[in-house]
Amino acid sequence: MEDLKLPPINYGAVAPMLILFGVACVGVLFEAVLPKAARRSAQLVLALLGLVAAFVMVVVKSDTRVLTAGEAIAIDGPTLFLQGAIILLGLMALLLVGDRSLEQGGAFVAQAAITVGSDADRRQATRAQGATEIYPLAVFAIAGMMLFVAANDLLTMFVALEVFSLPLYLLCALARRRRLLSQEAALKYFLLGAYASAFFLFGIALVYGFAGGLQFGTIHDAVRESDQSTFLLFGGIALVAIGLLFKAAAAPFHVWTPDVYQGAPTPITGLMAACTKVAAFGALLRVLYVAFDGAAWDYTPVLGVIAVLTMLVGAVLAVTQTDIKRLLAYSSIANAGYLLVGVLALSKDGLSSTMFYLVAYGFTVIAAFAIVTLVRDADGEATHLSRWAGLGRRSPLFAGIFTFILLAFAGIPLTSGFIAKFAVFGAAIESGEAWLVVFGVVTSMLLAFPYLRVVVLMWLSEPKETTPSVLVPGGLTAAALMIGVVATLVLGVAPAPLLDLTANAAEFVR
């Protein structure tokens, strides 16, 4: 019997992921061996240094184009670009997670197992330092997302899906205040996420039955040449797409998004809104462009209908929202629809414009949630829109920044939102998908209404006694906010360098 040989691994190519998985494991050891007083700063420094080291390795390996680990992992232009984006956006989110200056003890519960509403719960809400295991959990999630966008077979993609999903389920339940709402959000996310994972797994089974393998190259060849029943192929594409579209928050698989965004700790909401969307669309791009590109004629109309439905649901329901986090959740849903327009261009321009959109949206949305963490009263964050009336007169600087962010979401010129929408719509028109662009433009105009309503509320309403104050941000929150705002402005005024970078990176290896 021949010795069992493991597939060769290019350790340099996968070094960014190995660094983050290693950092997460060290963080778990810190929880076991370090005294409680030293954990917070040690865990934060470890996580930030790990992300910086991983980003440096992504830059160093930027010219790598290779299939490794038995062709289960693809390191190519889209992988490296999306991994770099996930790291940078994750770094911004961790800055929000680590800031303890806005609330005594931080935004996270000290002991998650304490019964909600008990005396111990009330005491920890006001005095105890927040849990520190959030840092290794967040790093595990970010590392899983990096593996997700690099996966070159469906089984590896499924493993990566679970690696980054399970920590997020836990993180959503750890809000210091509004504990019951936070736990409800985590439970909904977990249950619906489990269903989505099941759909994805059943899709893998059908695709394997059709192609006789799970690697994307094998599937690609089978789609073009196999004489197996197309029922297995189309059923597999549908079920795999459901699993991915759930993570992307596309309709009708979006129902978890408003509740989870509202109930989760705001820094974790920012992490999900930015990084999870990059990971979900990165995986969707690889599946559609590499594995199933031969069936594009069949799945494009269905995904086009989903894109239109997603844009409409996000835009229409955003108008009815009275909570700023739920408003941003429906905005995220609508943006998933615009991203699908770029995906369905099914061209190099579609790939590059989608990647640009993911980065531009990620910087802006984390900046938006950074502002949300600053608007507070004695009970914590004041997220009801009625409480934001007159905020421009109370704090014109931060109201002005939030106005700029909302204008970027609306796609106003000289912001990254305008360039991103122009890029994906232009790619769709060149590919003959003008009908998607029509719906995109109409829903963009409709979605501008709730954004402008918030602007009017902040600037043209009189402050009330219940109008909360805007706290001066700590250094970490200020850094995340500044990065997001500067990136939103620079990508709107001078987007050429990033557009060139996405164009150069827009080629998959097979």
Image (spheres, rainbow, N blue to C red):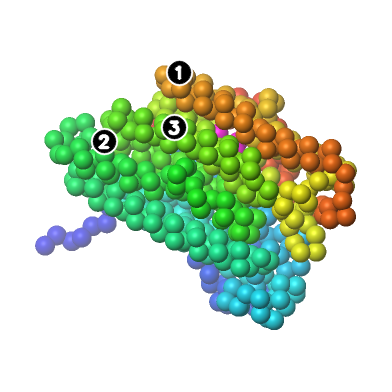
What residue would you read off at disc 3?
343
Where are the magenta residues, as a range? 357-361
Q: Amino acid at mark 2?
A: His
Separation of disc 2 and disc 3 at Cα? 18 Å
- Marks 3 and 2: in contact by CB < 8 Å? no
- Label 1 or label 3, whichever comes before in sequence order: 3
Which residue sits at x=68%, y=27%?
A: 412
Note whether residue 137 is visible: no
Q: Is residue 305 left or right of residue 226?
A: right
Give the structural element (helix, strand or loop) at label 3.
helix
Q: Report how far apart the C-alphas of labels 1 and 3 lie in the structure.
A: 13 Å
Q: Give the residue displayed 76% in from the left and 49% down from the top.
A: 386
Marks 1 and 2, the one that precedes in the sequence? 2
Q: Position of residue 384 (x, y in %)?
A: 72, 52
> 446 or 506: nearer the eye?
446
Is residue 192 shown to the viewer in this render?
A: yes
Tag 1 residue: 430
- What is the quadrant of the N terminus in the image? bottom left
Q: According to the image, label 2 marks what residue?
A: 220
Q: Are marks 1 and 3 in contact (CB under 8 Å)?
A: no
In the rendered image, the residue lying farthest to the bottom is 119
Q: Amino acid at mark 1?
A: Glu
Q: Residue 68 at what x, y percent from top left? A: 34, 46
Which element is circle 1 on?
helix
Q: Nearer the viewer, residue 489 or 433?
A: 433
Q: Which class describes the residues within 10 Å of circle 2: few (<14), some (14-19), or many (20+)?
A: many
Query: Residue extending furthest left?
Result: 1
Q: Where is 86 relative to 95, above or below?
A: above
> Residue at position x 24%, y 51% from top?
205
Residue drawn at x 23%, y 47% as measured from the top left: 206
